[in-house]
Image (tube, rainbow, N blue to C red):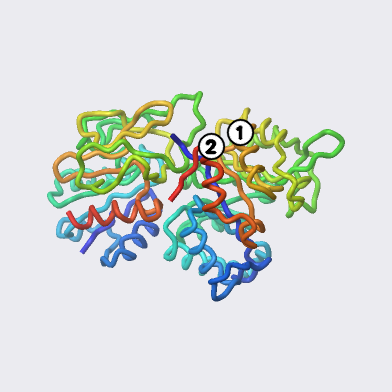
Amino acid sequence: MLKKRIIPCLDIANGRTVKGVNFVDIRDAGDPIELAKRYVEEGADELVFLDITATLEKRKTLVALVTQIASAINIPFTVGGGINSLEDAKAVILAGADKVSINSAAIKYPQLITEVSNYFGNQCVVVAMDVKNTQGNWKVFSHGGKTSTELDALEWALEAERRGAGEILLTSMNNDGTKNGFAIEITNTISEVVNIPVIASGGAGTMAHFKEVFQETKAGAALAASIFHFGEIPIPQLKTYLQNQKIPVRCL
Amino acid sequence: MIAILKYNAGNTTSVKNAVERLGYSCVVTDDPQVLQKAAKVIFPGVGEASTAMRYLKKRELDILIQSLKQPVLGICLGLQLLCKHSEENDTSCIGVFDAEVKRFPNELIVPHMGWNVLEVKESKLLKGISVVDDVYFVHSYYAEVSKDTKAICNYGIDFSAAMQKDNFYATQFHPEKSAGIGEQILKNFLEI
């Protein structure tokens, strides 16, 4: 049976992880390689690296980092943040990333989804969408949630799929950072309608939240950052819990 | 020397990294002489079947692959291209394995992406792998179960997760992305 995936997300700025970590035996908490290796050992199913300060001059730092990550870990990983062109995607994928995550650039220029998909196959293209419920409507936001767009969340998800996305990374801005649980309703709506995997993101605070999102939606994966970094929920413990709740997960 | 076939399908970086992590030296090449002399050949692949086959045929690499006598390992699209025919753009493939490659039915979420288990038959490649060991898959097409099938995976339907005929081995999953279990499988291949 296909397992539900648990995906830690690492925010990268200038080649270092930000937000810090408190793993006891990590020598350098800001080193993304150290942290990534730790997550692999703990049984993370995939990793996502988001370059949150991606600018043109920082691009080379990112590609060098991707090369290092690729030689250090043996599970799939996605790289996102500032992927604005097919050239950007090529640089990161050829350095060893399995997938690229496209967000604002896909909103501005949806053809980019198709270009990357045609070049590398749709399994390499994750369309990340930050959505927010305002007055009962789920709308898409760009530029790290700072800019509102007129796009309806469900319509944008369907368009992303039609244009060649292989996966959707759905982050609810209403839930992100609250630790009150994933946005079940919109995750359910989108994962029921699209025919590609959906990664639920934003709001994880307890192990029960993971159970809930997997039981009540068709999401194939759940992503979180701080609860893993700060060791609030150790991955092995989360996997054991989910397994006991009859949710299919990969246990080491 | 281990040779990894260089062609237009794919990301050979991950395979090269995985082989090197196991302490083997390898080269990514499309040079027929290097390929023929290599101790083992790995035929990876991520991409689309017809584009990949056109590229291989143009350079007669399809004939070369078929003629190899050393152990060959096809991975993902590599497995599919070693089959007879693929539904993906109605592509005639290399034909080492007498099997047809089909698209997953529309009612499933496609690609089949993530970790799944194997039902292993007798296989040198999968020595030591048990029913609880997950490996990483990402694919929209699958090879049907045939006489060359050495491991079955189920995603809505049973399909070939690993195949072998003579010196040709192949996995639909990505051993290079399957953590410790994948490492064991690659090690098994490198030690054949």
Residue furthest to the bottom: A27
Residue with the mark numbered 1? A215
Q: A223 and A194: which one is in front?
A: A223
Question: Which image quarter: residue A174?
Answer: top right
Q: Is residue A68 above or below residue B12?
A: below
Please identify the quarter of the rendering in which residue A190 is found: top right
Relative image position of residue B102 (x, y in whole percent): 36, 28
Judging from the image, mark 2 belongs to the subunit labelled: A
- Name the residue located 53 percent from the left edge and 47 percent from the top edge: A239
- Of residues A80 and A4, the one drawn nearer to the viewer in this rendering: A4
Which residue occupies 45% across, 24% down? B105
The residue positioned 59% from the left and 71% from the top of the image is A29
Q: Is residue A164 left or right of residue B137?
A: right
- Lateral position of residue B171 relative to residue B71, left or right: right
A95 is higher (above) or lower (below) than A212: below
Give the amino acid type for the residue marked by disc 1 in the picture: Gln
Q: Secondary structure at mark 2?
A: loop
Q: Does the image show residue A236?
A: yes
Classify residue A112 as left or right of residue A42.
right
Above-or-below relation of A86 to B163: below
- Residue A54 placement (x, y as % from top left): 65, 64
Q: Is residue A158 visible?
A: no
Of labels 2 and 1, earlier in sequence is: 1
The reply to whether discs 2 and 1 touch (Cβ–Cβ < 8 Å) is yes
